Amino acid sequence: MATGSVRDRPASATSVVGWRAFISLVGSAAAAWPFAARAQQTPQPVIGFLGPTTPDHYAPRLGAFREGLKEAGYVEGRNVAIEYRWAEDDYGRLPALAAELVRQQVAVIVASNTPSAVAAKGATATIPIVFETSSDPVEAGLVSSLNRPGGNVTGVTNLSVEAGPKGLELVRELLPKATIIGVLVNPTSPTITEQFLRGLQATARGLGMQLHTVPASAVRDFDMVFATLAQLRADALVISPDTFFSSQSQELAGQALRQKLPAIYVNALFAAAGGLVSYGGSQIETYRLLGRQTGKVLSGAKPADLPVEQATKVELTINLKTAKALGIAVPSTLTGRADELIE
């Protein structure tokens, strides 16, 4: 028995020492795991999305924006987060909303129209800003030049303002005798208003048309707008490419149809809602490019050196049902050029 007890002691001691060493090793590893996991995790960058209207109105554009982000390697909820701020058609709220995003120290601010971009630029000179605009961003004071923006701002433009004069030509094709043209503008968006009217005026003179501007910055203004157009005996209405008007496509198209007034607007949603014609830059292409530009900035590109991109696709949509209701015979030369016909 003595021999057995002598042999048992070293074995027992060895087991205890080994077990303690194992426990110590596991404990050290367990303590180290959270630190290692934290070291491997990189905080998701946050995009601050500054929108002038409502998320419902922006649904198709947001889908295209996310597609562009994905093309650049970023997926919302996976490796990037997005904080949304919506002005709900009140442009006066944009500076405060932009300041909110700055306080949150987002990685980049996406400004989804000209007033949003102006508000964002006024709120920060350091956080990168990527804008979408229909206007000339150099004239608007957003960038120094298209190729070398300078500062902390770059973005994407579309051809909606440039499409304005062509819109008047479309009116002439549809209504050969039209001379009195109402132009709906948003006075709280002066940059787009000025550039759009400047482009229309030369074409109007050449076509023998008289332009009459009517302002609206809230839905409550629309009744007065259409009453004024009735007093003017306007032959047609051209709507400036402002995001507020896009968000009210249904209301504007409905009132124009009730007043028997042919109307044209840049956004395809307008014709889909019952407007006669939509002609302007593709919002889907524009917002896909906006997502890609944003992804480039998240990946380290400096806005100062990132050229402003231009969406070049222009879409023509004609609502033939509305044309029939207005007694307008759409020429085949025009239907043949349309991207979409609504019947």
Image (cartoon, helix red, strand yellow):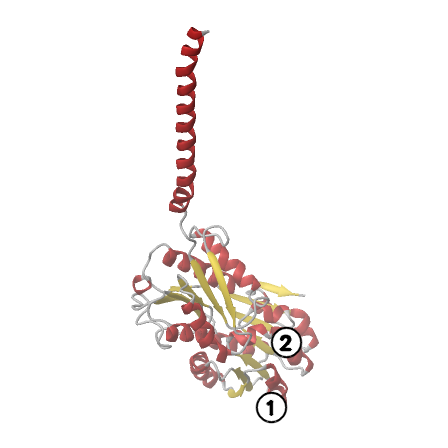
Tell me, yes or no, if residue 276 can be seen here: no
Tell me, yes or no, if residue 185 can be seen here: yes
Q: In the image, 297: left or right of 85?
A: left
The front one of 93 and 10 is: 10
Q: Residue furthest front?
A: 2
Q: Position of residue 93 (x, y in %)?
A: 49, 77
Q: Quadrant of residue 250?
A: bottom right
Three-letter residue code for mark 1: Thr
The front one of 309 and 262 is: 309
Instruction: Specify few, some or many for label 2: CA neighbours under 10 Å numbering under 14, 14-19, or 20 or more.
Output: many
Q: Quadrant of residue 331?
A: bottom right
Q: How many marks?
A: 2
Q: Position of residue 102 (x, y in %)?
A: 41, 69
* Numbered disc 1: secondary structure: helix
Give the quarter of the figure containing the C terminus.
bottom right
Q: Are marks 2 and 1 in contact (CB under 8 Å)?
A: no
Name the residue at 51% across, 61% down: 284
Q: Position of residue 91 (x, y in %)?
A: 50, 78
Q: What residue does disc 1 label?
A: 228
Above or below, 157 against 326 in this view is above
Three-letter residue code for mark 2: Ala
- Which label's residue is closer to the chain start, 2 or 1? 1
Above or below, 133 against 188 in this view is above
Name the residue at 43% across, 31% down: 23
Circle on res. 253 = 2
Q: In the image, 83: left or right of 309?
A: right
* Numbered disc 2: secondary structure: helix
Q: Position of residue 263 (x, y in %)?
A: 59, 78
Above or below, 38 against 89 in this view is above
